[in-house]
Amino acid sequence: MKILAIETSCDETSASVVLAGKKSGVKKLSNVVSSQILIHRKTQGVVPEVAARAHISKISAVVQKALKDAKTSLESIDYLAVTNGPGLISSLLVGCEYTKGLALALNKRVIPTNHMLGHLYSAFVSDPKIKLPSINLIVSGGHTYLILLKKKNKFEVLGSTVDDAAGEAFDKIAKMLGLAYPGGPEISKWAANAKKKKGFKDYAFPRPMINAKNFDFSFAGLKTAVLYKIRDEKLNLKNPQTKANLAYSFQEAAVDVLVKKTIKAAEKYKTKSITLSGGVAANKLLRKKLASASRKTHNKFYVPDFSLCTDNALMIANAAAIKVQGGFKPVKYTKLKVNPQLELR
Ligand code: KG4
Ligand code: ZN
């Protein structure tokens, strides 16, 4: 089956075509991503109305390019897949209404796909034979999930964040330090340079919920700890070394919590693999530390290519294919409903 997937849940307009087997396997034919980063940099964050307008202006061209790259036509597509949540409602509506139009005009069925399911299965795009059960840490701008994947299409959410998502914490701290949007890559860039200079200092920020009995996360307290440190010690953010030290100390604390809790879950459920996905999976320190901790617990570690960590339609096409391979029946376009708070279950 050939699937055309569309992703517009936040600030990337993306379309992808894949060829999938009836029972397993997904082959990428194309994946086009048009990023709005430069637009949102001006406001240091995503303004939903602006994001939706940018999706509207790009979506047709992105879909056309995905079809062209895949050397295929709309008529030869079997199913349309689209992200129907979670995300920004106005952004989600653009992708979903566009998909409805295509489905109506072409008389095709639709696979509504949870954005987080896309992230969950994204490591399978390049490694379809990941040994299960696995523990999956999904860290994105809007969500933080620890998931036990028992087999494909059968998973349990072990924990999530009780306040800010991991990526959100990176973005908010970057904003506090006067760094550009999105904050995650900026924090890691500044943190990487901290140790190289003479004025290096680790502020040893708290590791929230690191020893809690459950698998939930909390990042709001860590954000406040950074804020209070700057305020109480009257830190001069114009000093590049101070900025680098703060970025370093925050990143160490956040990564520490993410790694410790993931490993604890892997040990408890005696898993064979650990996967890392979502935008924050692009973080080099997190990749390195989780890879090394996984090895120590005899779990094979998987992380998607950098391009598949942040939002893209290939992960949506892949998740949609896995859904159908697991028995999901694509629906009529009238059944496609947008839900900005769609839960992963
Ligand atoms: O998955 P994603 O593209 O969008 C959502 O579904 O939210 O994740 C975006 C998040 C942003 O918060 C961004 O700052 C973060 O991923 N991110 C990073 C890095 N690259 C992107 N966080 C830490 N280190 C990075 N290198
Ligand atoms: Zn995402």
Image (spheres, rainbow, N blue to C red):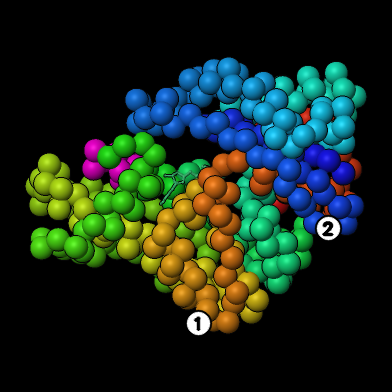
Residue 170 place in picture, x, y as percent: 37, 48
Residue occupying the point 23% across, 42% down: 177
Amino acid at dot 1: Lys
Label 1 – label 2 distance at C-alpha: 31 Å
Quadrant of the image occupied by residue 305? bottom right
Q: Is residue 183 above or below residue 281?
A: above
Judge depth for marks 1 and 2 and give the one in front: 2
Q: Nearer the viewer, residue 14 or 87?
A: 14
- Which range is magenta? 172-178
Answer above or below: position of 8 versus 197.
Answer: above
Say which of 178 and 84 sits in front.
Answer: 178
Of mark 1 and mark 2, the one earlier in the sequence is 2
Residue behind mark 2: 24
Residue 313 shown in magenta: no
Compared to 315, does 112 lie above or below? Answer: above
Q: Position of residue 99 (x, y in %)?
A: 75, 26
Q: Residue 121 placed where, x, y %?
A: 67, 55
Q: Main secondary structure of the magenta part?
A: helix
Q: Which residue is mark 1?
A: 296
- On the image, the x and y values in percent for residue 184 come to 38, 47
